[in-house]
Image: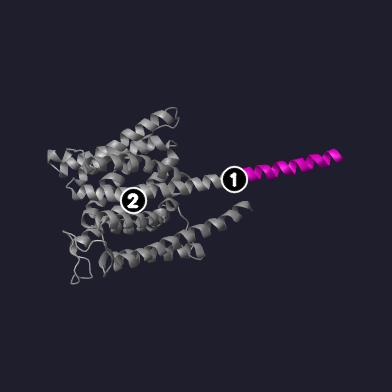
Amino acid sequence: MQEEQDDQESSVRDGIRIRSSTTKGEACEEFRQYMYCIFSNFCFAGYNIVSKISLDKGMSRYVLVAYGHAFGTLATALFAFLFERNNNSKLSVAIFRNVFFLGLLGAVLGRTLFFAGLEYTSPAFASALGNLIPSITFILAVLCRMEKLDISKRGSQAKILGTIIAFGGATLMTLYKGLTVISFHSQRSHQPTTGSRSVLLDKDSIKGSLMLLVSYISLSAFYILQTITIKMYQAPITLTSLTCLSGAILSTIMTEILDHKASSWTLSWNITLLAPIYSGIMIFGITVYVQTLVVRKKGPVFMTAFRPLATIIVAIMGMLILGDALYMGSIIGASLIFLGLYATLWGKEKESGEAVPANHI
């Protein structure tokens, strides 16, 4: 009798120990996903600044996209060979089709239009407007039935309200500039800051805003398709390399069509060399791979939810390095986008919390 009681107590202790180790493992995995997202946004902050400087120096946006994806292909192909050469996943026609569209959405539409919009605006503005990506991703995820939407539940109501608020903030940023709030430089050669300037954005700024908006819609579609494809092909580094290769080929064809100057392909030992290497290795290579890991575990909406961190970093770097000014319209609009973003996230977490008990019943 005593032995049976001891066995039961031992079983209980073992069960508690297993649950405790499982909980710790889950906590570590959760922490790792947060670190991946934070790391990605630091990389994106530097990407915005480096890209803006290289474009202002006269580098072709088309060449920057092509070189960036080429460097990304080389970097990720090496890692794929080292870590995934024994990968058993099979490449199918459906996967090659998705890789083609990933290159089209990410490189040709997403990055090229982003650089075009960046030429007409500033890194801080582009990064702030980029916080629309989670809301756009949420809409596309609902349309693709990757996200549930039950209007009778608070979680879904919060996500809908957050999306509306975020788009309202983006509209305000696009149309309204407002007064200068912070500026470390009293005057810039290509953007004078006088008191007589209009509080509304000029035509070029609106054009740049619309280009950025289309770019972010394309990148949101990229994240949705990336989520679908990684479930079909369980080799994230190889998939990242194939995506970069597709982007490099498509953007090279686009460059040959739209930029006929052979001199555009010349790289010098300055920012025009640093920009494609940084974008290729740090963004199209490492960061896209890290994002692939996150979307596989947490989904596309979670991955895009950390973009406000990049906005803050870019705003500080833009003021210190580029002499950009912060305007009232951008601050109010970005605040509304932040508010909408976290309303959407709260709604998602609310729905996840409601789903967990239901799964245990």
Closer to the camera, 116 or 181? 181
Image mark for residue 24 = 1
Left or right of 178? Residue 339 is right
Image mark for residue 82 = none
CA separation in Å, label 1 and label 2 = 32 Å
x, y (%) of residue 279?
30, 43
At x 38% / y 57%, what residue is drawn? 308
x, y (%) of residue 256?
16, 40
Up/down of 108 relative to 239, above or below: below
| Residue 346 is a magenta residue | no
Q: What is the quadrant of residue 181 in the picture?
A: bottom left
Question: Which residue lies under the disc numbered 2?
Answer: 45
The answer to whether residue 157 of the structure is visible from this angle is: yes
Provide the residue span drawn in magenta.
1-23
Which mark is first along the chain, 2 or 1? Answer: 1
SS for tag 2?
A: helix
x, y (%) of residue 314?
32, 55
At x 61% / y 55%, what residue is drawn? 357
At x 42% / y 66%, what residue is drawn? 161
Closer to the camera, 201 or 207? 201
Amino acid at pointer 2: Ala
Amino acid at pointer 1: Lys
x, y (%) of residue 236?
42, 38
SS for tag 1?
A: helix
Left or right of 156? Residue 73 is left
Few, some or many residues within 10 Å of mark 2 (<14, 14–19, 20+): many
Q: Tell whether label 2 touches label 1 (CB within 8 Å).
A: no
